[in-house]
Image: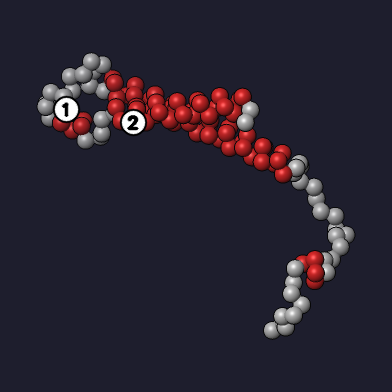
Amino acid sequence: MSTFETVLLMLLVVDALALAALVLLQQGRGADVGAAFGSGSSNTMLGASGAASFLTKVTAWLAIGFFIISFGLAYFAKERALEVEGIGIPQLASPETPELTEEEEGVDSDIPDV
């Protein structure tokens, strides 16, 4: 694994932990209904909706970062798998490919055709 892949993997783990923590910190949609009827829960430090909108924006950016990092790691994993198998750019097959014999195809000649 290259150094860049290791850094991406560490960023992915940190991003996932931060994303999980922010999702758990946020209130559900039903918590705002009590504030609408004057239950007093709307008195927050950042205002009635100030903290919610900030946490929502940070959560959205962390989710976008999570997907970008995941796609980057998937791309590097694909490239490494192709290098291991020795597959480069796919070549077009020539139209004059030889026909395979029954032994090469792995067809058992003892089985009668139905």
Q: Can you say whether 113 is above or below 99 in the image?
A: below
* Callout 2 crowding tier (Cα within 10 Å): few <14, some 14–19, many ≥20: some
The residue identified by callout 2 is 23
Position of residue 96 measured from the top left corner of the image (x, y, whole percent) = 88, 59
SS state under label 1: helix
Whether residues under marks 1 and 2 lie with C-beta atoms below 8 angstroms apart, the answer is: no
Q: Three-letter amino acid code at disc 1?
A: Ala
74 on left or right of 110: left
Q: Three-letter amino acid code at disc 2?
A: Val
SS state under label 2: helix
Q: Can you say whether 90 is above or below 22 in the image?
A: below
> Which quadrant would the C terminus be assigned to in this image?
bottom right
> Can residue 64 be seen here?
no
Mark 1 vs mark 2, CA separation in Å:
21 Å
Q: Which mark is first along the chain, 2 or 1? A: 2
In terms of depth relative to the viewer, which is nearer, 3 or 8?
A: 3
Q: Residue sitting at 20 percent across and 32 percent down?
A: 31
Label number found at residue 35 = 1
Q: Residue sitting at 62 percent across and 37 percent down?
A: 77
